[in-house]
Every structure is written in C-alpha cells, then in structure tokens.
Image (cartoon, grey):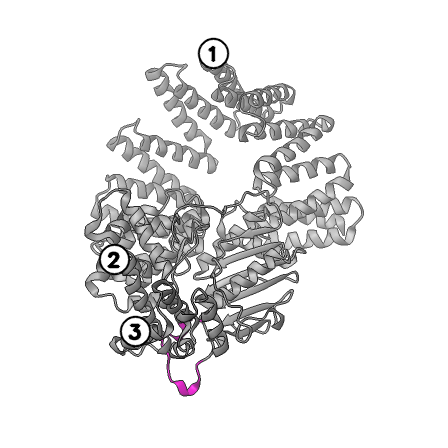
Amino acid sequence: MAGVTMNRQVRAETPSQSANWPVWSGSVPPLAECFSPRPETGFDATRGLARGATVVLTPPAPAAEAGPRPLAGMGGTGKTQLAVAFARALWHTREVDLLAWVPAGSRDAVLTGYAQALAAAGLPGADTGTGTAAASFLTWLGSASRPWLVVLDDLADASDLAGLWPAGPAGMVLVTTRLPGSAVGGDDRKILEVGAFSPREALGYLATTLSEDAGMRAGALDLATDLGFLPLALAQAAAVVADSKTDCRGYRTAFADRTRQMPADGAGQDAATVAATWSLSLDRADCLSPPGMAGHALALAALLDPAGIPGPVLTSRAACDYICGRQATGTRADESQVRSVVESLAQVGVVMIDPESASRTVLMHGLVQATIRRVIPPAMLEQVTSAAANALLQAWPADDAEPLVAQALRDCAASLQRAAAGLLWTTQAHPVLFRAGQSLDRAGLNGLAISYWQDMISTSQVLGQAHASIPLAHDSLAAAYLSAGRAADAADVYEQSLAEQEQALGADHPDTLTTRSSLARACLGAGREADAILLYERTLSDRERVLGRDHPATLASRDDLVAAYLLAGRPQPAIVILQRTFNDRAAVLGPDHPETLTAWAELAAALQAGGQLKEAVRLHERILTERERAQGATHPDTMTARASLAYAYRSADRLKHALPVYERTLADREKVLGPDHPDTLTSLANLASAYHSAHKLKQAMPLYEEALARHERSKGPGHPDTLTARGNLASAYHSAGRLAQSIPLYEQTLQDYEWLMGPDHTNTLTSRANLASAYHTVGRRTEAVALFGRTLADCERLLPEDHPMTQAIRENLQAAT
C-alpha cells in the first residue's frame, strides 16, 4: 500500500455532458486482490439477472433454533464484492452501455447517484437539480434501448427506494442489502441469499491468500471453522497471517484467547467473531505504526460512512491532530503520518483504500464499524465525535462543486449523527449539521432538505426555545420551502421567525430586517402581493433610517420593492422610487457615472413595463449615448444598453428601428465576448425572434439554426436553454411550412421537457400543444386531438380557469375536432 495518495482523483467522477458511450458512472469499489468467485455459495448471474430483471442479494435468514442475532444483519458475507465482480465483468466484456454504481445508504445518496448517471450519459436534465435529474434518469431507463446495469449497493432502508426502483426492458438491477429478503421482496424481484463460505471455498480462499508460503496454511480448515466461514473475518485473519508471517494455527490460538477476553454482550456470533478479528488486526497495525495512532484512526473512521470516506477528511487538520495525538506537529508531515497509518490498517484488512475515488477513498465494513463503536469509552467517544465533525467541516468545499464528494460528505455527516447525535449539540448545533443541510439545499433536494430542517428544529426545541440554533434552522426551513415552490409554507415559517426575532432582538436589528424582507419575498411568491408590498415598504423605510440610504442592504430593499410594485401591476410608485434614486445618484456622482446610468436604465425599464413606451425609448436612447461616450462602444454595459434599446423599439412596435440595433449588438458581442458567451447567444436568439416577428423568415431561419447549434456545442443537448432554442427552431420551421423538419424537433423537444421538467411544467404543456398543432396542420388528426385533449386536461387541473393558455388550447381542440 506504499505511496497511496488518499486525496488524489484518478478516475473522473463528474463526467462532462457530452458522453462517450459506453458510460461508467459512480465509484465502484475495488475488487479484493484474492477475490473468490464462490462457485458454491456465491451469486450466479444465470440464476436470475437477465434483461429486465431485478436481483436482490440479502443475508441468509437465521435458523429458528439459532435464536436472535442482533447484529447478524450487518453482513460480512461478501455481497458487495460479488456485485463488484459482476459489474466489472459486464463492463469489461462490453455487455452494458451504461454502468451506474449507486451507494444506497440513504434516499439522498440514491437520488444523487441517479442524477450523476444522467449527467455522465449526457442526457437531458442534468442541470435541473438532483431530484428532477434523478426522475429523468429513471424515465430514460424505462425506455432505453441501450443495455444498462444499475447497482444499488448496501440498501439501508427499503423505504428509501419508494418510487425510485429502476426498471426497463433493456436493463438489469442488482441490489445488495443487509435487510432480510422479506423487507425488499416484490413480485418482480428475485431474492438471492448470500451467506458464509462453504468449507471448500474457505480453504480455497485461504490457499490463494496465503500462497506465498504453504506453511502459513497449517490449520487453515480449523481456523475457518472457528471463524464460522464468515468472509469478512477470514479476510482479516488472512491479512494478519500474511503480514506477520505466522500461520493459521498460531492465529487460531490468538483468536481463541481474544474471544475469551471479549465481554459477552449478546451482539451475536458474527459480531463477536469480527470483534475478535478486528482487535487482532489492530494489534498488528500498531506494530506497523506509532502506538495508539491506528486505534484513533479506526475510531474516527468507525463514526463515518461505511460506503467510503473522502480522503481529505482523514488528512484534515482536525483528523490529523486527533489521530497523531501528542505526536502531532501541526505541519504537513502529520498528513503523511496519517496516510501511513491508514495504509497499515488496509494492510491488515480492517479498511480498504480506493485510490481512484475522490469521494469514497477509504472504506470500512459496517460490521467492523458497529463492533468498534460498541467498545469506544464515553470520554473517547466525545473526543472522536468532535474531531470527526470538525474534520468533515474542514474538508467540505464551499461550493459543493463535485456532487459525488458532496454526497459522500453528507453520508458521513449522517453516519456521525446516528453514532453520536447527542454529542453534536451543546449550547448550539455543531456547524457541520448546518453544512449538511445547506448541501442538501444546494443539490436541489428540496423535499429531503425540508425534512432535514424540520428535524433540526425539533431537536433544537427539545433543548429549549431559547436555543441558539432555532432562528437559523427556521430560516433554512423557510428557504427550503421557497426552493420547493411552497411559498405559503415559507411565509408561515418566516412569520413565526419574525415574531421571535422582534421579541428577542428588537424590530430594528439587522437580522430582524432581513427576516422581514424574506417574509415579503415569500408572500410575493404565495400571491399575497399586497402583504409583500407593505412588508417591503416597511423594511425599506427601516433600513434607510437604521443603515442609511446608500447601504447595500437598503439598496437591495429598494430593488425588491420596485420589483414587487411592477409584478403587482403598479408601475407608478416604482417609477417614483427609481426617479428619486436617479436624481440622488446624478446629484452625488454626476450624470455620466456608471451607477447613475444604471439607475437611469432601471427607470427606463419601469417606464417600459408601465406602458410609457415613448418616454422609455427616449431614455434608452440617451442612456446608450452616454454609455458610448463614457465607457466606449464595446464595453459590456454599453452593449447591454444597446440590447435594451432594441427591446424598447420592439415593444413600441418599431421593428424597423429595432433590427439594426439587434444586429449591431450581436456583432459586437461576438467580437468582444465570443460566439458561445451567454450574452452572445441571447443576442442571437433575440435577433432571430425579431426577424421572425417582422415576417422575415428567410433571415430568421439560419439564425435559429445557428443558435441551436451553438447551445448544443457550449451547453450540451440537455440544457434548458438548448431545449428553448430547439423549440424556437421548430416553431420557425412550422411558420415556414417546413413541417417535415418541424415535427421531429417538436417531438424531441417535448420528450426532453418531460424528462427535464416533468409532465406538468408549463414548458412541457406548451411543447405538447405545439406538437399537437403541427400534427393538425399535416392532417394527423387523431394524434392532434389526443395531445390537445391531454394538454387541456392538464391545464384545467394546473392553471387558473381563465388562464389564456387554457383558453387557447380549448379553441385549438375544438378546431381539431
């Protein structure tokens, strides 16, 4: 194991959207060097895993006469290794085009694994949030023609797969779990029990592992019998025998002595066996590293996720200080020492290192973890819990840029909570608990985030209403509600939080003002526009009084209030505020200062929204002139001003004036920003649309085609902007009477929107209606009526009764029938 670097990423775990098939997604654990295919007791693919099948590998049910075995469900029988061997064999023989390895320790982990597989395959929806992307992946599996394999490893709770079981005629599903077959069975699932080695398999395994010296195998059958033929125990025993150059007879004697020393705690025979073997492995590891370090490393790893711990967690400052103890130097030398300790633990079979995985670098079997946790003294547990929590926090990237790493960190945090929840709460929750929740928010796992924050609040309240964690947990819950589109629920939480803060902190405290602003935003989202405006008005007034008119928070409140006025159809008060802001900026900074010009542009946009188009156009023209004079013709702000003027001309139905301005904006942005910059792509789409509105399809068509090509090249085929570009091109073809080209694009766009946003999203409904219209145009009446009918039913269910879209589709359906 010398030279292993635990934080080095060799295999890319976040593939680009442009997939090269076949596709490998996820971090498949390494196959043990002396893996046994287990011809007598192992998993035989011919026994049930064929296309369209689901096989679940479970531990054997205990015999009735054996009595209760509390930890028997912890496994140790080698199910994951059998799954690894099967998955790698299919991959190397190219029998599958997609291999997705998904840790299944939590619903969160399953959703993240599915979303990652969607991204790896370059399928539509990878940028839509984890939950939506996972649903898109399951939809794709159901209709895919490419052969695929999904492995759900170590399923911890059958309810975590509710609505998430993969299925499809081209695929295979393999599940490993410590749950009994009765908990995961189903009409379409084949249960295969994987138990201990047979005597012949155990002897074969020991012969292979100890092949270096035949003398080491003396007493092998007796040792295997003593260990109950349990694969996990045999692996640890063989590693110690091979490393210490002893023999099975000597290990058997040591095992018997250690077993007598172990307290009888009723944990079950498998747990008692592993308790003795891991402690013997620890003794050997202590011979390979400074005394005490191996035990500290094991204790820390035992509190984290068995499916894998990111290397940077174990080499963090907090972990190094704890593992190295008094010998810690506070320098990078500690990291090297910790790597050496972990490598020694791998050498004696207690952990496994996957140097190719950045997210699941160090793995420890759950049964080993459970037996270690049972013997950690309370004082030591408090220390190691603090070290583990701090290590996770130090290793956690601020942006969660690598989804699989973020998922592994969340899994580690969840394992830590299960192992030592009470120790993570003192006068307030440990910051890692909030970091884990924020990571759920960032991943777009709205439902799970809501449940997480609700649990945090419940725990906080057990510690007393004045607990310092409650306000932050409330705000986090409300934000999760908003992200999930549940603005009314968010408003309820913010109202409660605001009342508590006004009482505890006072009405003018910055935190109170921030919560009032958040409540206003939630009210606006819930359709309570009048309430939102009153809250925004009060917040703006208070911030001007407390913080000053030019404070950033005050300016943000002003912008929020203006947006609320415009959304509520009250442009005049918005215009009054923006006029005052412009006058203030002009008086202090001068009329041509960039901030003054920005305020002027906001005023022009408000005038335009209020229907004062002539005045808006006049202001936009003056702003562009000032920008060109003060900042130059190709400054980004100037180009934005030019684009705004073009839009103002178009809104005023002055397309003759708008087109050359759109053309100039596109040319400048292509030259300055490049052809694939988002602003350039927006200008390209705007020019195409303007030509389309001017009935100049000959000029519009190549621009629509170019816009789609650039979006596919720069953002991928599944990005929402790409779908919009594809739909725009289909509409242009439709307008031009080129239905043979239009219909396939409409069909693809509809399919992608259903994957991307679900069947009820407005974009999906619009896309379905567009396809129905195209079908009607070419005389495919039955298909058109069916699509119009389905879309109308959805609109009547989802939209207000008088919504213009509902009325338009109803009229189209009547025309089609």
Q: Are marks 3 and 1 in contact (CB under 8 Å)?
A: no
Q: Amino acid at mark 3?
A: Ala
Q: Taken as a whole, is the magenta stretch helix, strand or loop?
A: loop
Residue that numbered label 3 is attached to: 254
User: For residue 739, what is the image quadrant?
Assistant: top right
> Residue, x 35% and y 60% (percent of image)?
415
> Residue 22 in the image: x percent, y percent?
62, 50
> Residue 635 in the image: x percent, y percent?
48, 19
Q: Amino acid at mark 2?
A: Val
The Cα atoms of the two marked residues, 3 and 2, are separated by: 29 Å
Q: Is residue 502 left or right of residue 791?
A: left
For marks 3 and 1, the one nearer the N-term is: 3
| Secondary structure category for the residue under label 1 | helix
Q: Which residues are magenta?
A: 62-77
> Residue, x 61% and y 71% (percent of image)?
48
> Residue 740 in the image: x percent, y percent?
78, 41
The Cα atoms of the two marked residues, 1 and 2, are separated by: 64 Å
Closer mark to the observer between disc 3 and disc 1: 3
Q: Are marks 3 and 2 in contact (CB under 8 Å)?
A: no
Say which mark, if any, is on residue 629.
Answer: 1
